[in-house]
Image: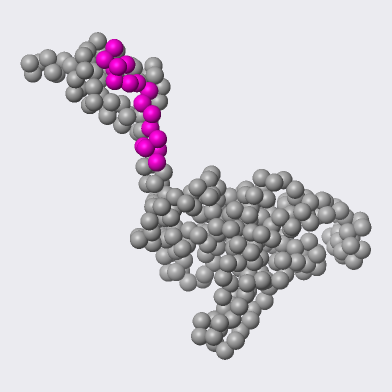
Amino acid sequence: MNDPLKSLREIRFSIENNFKILSIERIIYEFNKILLDKNPSKGIFFYYKIGLLKIILPELINIKGIKKIQKHKHKDNFYHTLKVVDNISNYSNNLWLKWAALLHDIGKYLTKKYISNIGWTFYSHELIGAKMIYSIFKRLKLHKKKNIKYIKNIIKYSSRPITLISYLTTDSSIKKLLVNMGNSIEDLILLCKSDITTQNFLKKKQFKQKLDFFKKKIKKIEEKKNKQKFFFPLSGDNIMNILNINSCKEIGILKKLLKKAIIKGIIPNDFNKASLFIKKKGKSMLKIKLKIK
């Protein structure tokens, strides 16, 4: 069995000697394992207690602490961050999303400002934080460009969904965010959800309801976009050839039925499957037409 005290001494000795024994790659390898845990905050706090966090991620130490002027004070953003990382671990085990959660507030150290009668502000901390990511990952020797780009994007837009939570928000504002986020929009929403660390149950519930509403708006926009992008597998001429009929109003009706069936997932958007669907529906429709005549 490993001696825990011996392990602690080795870590302390390594810190005192500026990683001459432990390489930064090895330290980050172990740190990533901590981030992938169900409760990463325990391991991260341990790194903080032994002084290792101050060396590898001083940006997190910089946001630690509470300042109060008159009746105004801000929360301890370090402990808030630990809660956010734990929260996001309940929804996802994506290592890079957890890195984004860990670093999402680092820009607050450089943007913190006290304004009389308003209190503490951290305007544009997301933009500043996103700009800091490249140098941090270079220092930690986490060089993959796609991971850096992903984390920068998540942090840059981390407050955007909250500002767009409104019944009056236009579709164009949400579309712009969707373009910027691409396939990462779900991860961004998970971060926003995890960022709600208030102990006020009512506030927490309201925020989550608003985020759910925001997700519904996104879904409607995407459905509308998919409908606009719809391509028919069959043309009007194809339908006339399949049914051996001339141009008539029934072709328009059949095209609508076909589109509806494809959008609902009843049949795939495929020429052969669509042809079979048209044969079946067309024959039934034309029989009814003949009976009426």
Which residue is at 39% across, 52% downward?
171
Q: How many marks?
A: 0
Q: Is residue 194 visible?
A: no
Question: Quick check: 293 above or below 145?
Answer: above
Which one is in front, 175 or 90? Answer: 175
Which residue is at 77% across, 54% downward?
138
Question: Quick check: 83 above or below 180?
Answer: below
Q: Residue furthest bottom?
A: 70
Which one is in front, 235 or 2? Answer: 235
Q: In x, y percent, where is residue 177?
A: 49, 52
Q: In x, y percent, where is residue 213?
A: 39, 56
221 relative position to 67: left or right: left
51 relative position to 120: left or right: right
Q: In x, y percent, where is residue 231?
A: 38, 29
- Colour scheme of the picture: one colour
64 relative position to 87: left or right: right
Q: Residue furthest top?
A: 244
Which residue is at 90% across, 66% downward?
16
Which residue is at 89% across, 62% downward?
18
Q: Is residue 238 magenta?
A: yes
- Look at the image and tell me in which quarter the C terminus lies: top left
| Res 290 quadrant in image | top left
Q: Is residue 155 magenta?
A: no
Q: In x, y percent, where is residue 188?
A: 54, 53
| Res 260 quadrant in image | top left
Which one is in front, 230 or 86? Answer: 230
What span is in magenta? 225-241
| Res 74 quadrant in image | bottom right
Q: Residue furthest left?
A: 293
Q: Is residue 7 visible?
A: yes
